[in-house]
Image (cartoon, rainbow, N blue to C red):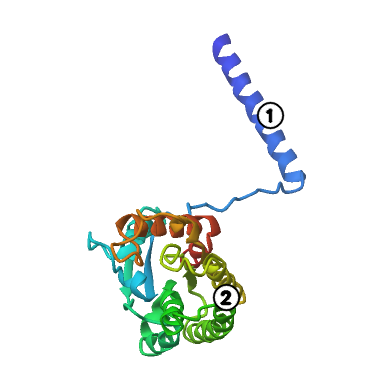
Amino acid sequence: MKKWGLCIWFILFCAGCSSTEAMNIADSPLRQVHLYPLTIDRYFFPRDVNVLAIGDSLTEGVGDNDYQGGYVSRLQKKMLQHKGIRAVTVTNLGKRGLRLSQLDDVVETHPQAVKEADIIFITIGGNDVMKIVRSHLFDLSYSLFEREQKTFVKRLDRLMATIRTWNEDATIVLIGLYNPFSSSLQAIPEIDDVIDLWNNGSKEVISRYDHTIFVDVKDLFDNRDDVLYSDQFHPNELGYELIATRVYEKLQKEKTWLGRIEQ
């Protein structure tokens, strides 16, 4: 009987404590509850990326004996390693011999490809330099290249404006020129300075536009015959691999392209 009495007393005591605590809670101001949003890794849902490659023979992949598509296909494989990308669809409009003055037509005749692109890769200018060399083989001078470079940057600015009329958000990647003339144009010791002049002008032009990247690859080819095709002008397999690696490293560093696909 005493055991039952102790149990009843204990139950009543607990009930009393609970009632008192409940009254205290009721009388106290409401406590603020912090709810934190559920966070999901930004790469949880990988994206499909549309790539447009335009330009000259480097975009086409001339000199690639492995027939892998030059730097473009190699770069595609590297991009697929990124965990934020599920698939990379490439439209390659590169054409051997193309000069900057002809690139406007390529863009204007393929507006849908430009509109749908998340990233646009461009190689251009090598044939423009070569045209000057062939047209003035016996009277080449730095001042001649300097004059033609001013025309080149004006055309490049017009090309950029044309692309932006069709696509305001795509990341535009312009790959700079390298110097394949160091041995063939020994009569012009300033040829290295000429390439730098053209690259700096191109870099300045695209810097005026949002979501643009300039990739300098000149140092990859300086005084190296092992990265050139047998014609001593186009890259070979190693040369294209070096270009693709440099471009991908630049993309990762800039992260501009990631910003476009993560929106």
Sequence order check: which comes first, mark 2 or mark 1?
Answer: 1
Relative horizontal placement of residue 43, taking residue 145 as reference (left or right): left
Query: Which quadrant: the N terminus?
Result: top right
Q: Position of residue 128 (x, y in %)?
A: 45, 80
Relative horizontal placement of residue 47, taking residue 3 as reference (left or right): left
Mark 2: which secondary structure? Answer: helix
- The quarter of the displayed image where residue 54 is located: bottom left
Q: Please name whichever residue, 126 or 71, is drawn nearer the observer in this view of the structure.
A: 126
Q: Position of residue 60 (x, y in %)?
A: 31, 72
The residue depicted at 37 percent of the width and 76 percent of the height is 56
Q: Please name whichever residue, 189 or 168, is drawn nearer the observer in this view of the structure.
A: 189
Mark 1: which secondary structure? Answer: helix
* Residue named by callout 2: 142
Q: Is residue 106 above or below residue 189?
A: below
Q: CA distance from mark 2 to mark 1?
A: 96 Å
Q: Please name whichever residue, 75 or 22, is drawn nearer the observer in this view of the structure.
A: 75
Q: Is residue 167 visible?
A: yes
Q: Position of residue 86 (x, y in %)?
A: 34, 59
* Neighbour tally class for label 1: few under 14, some 14-19, many 20 plus, Cα within 10 Å: few
* Residue named by callout 1: 17
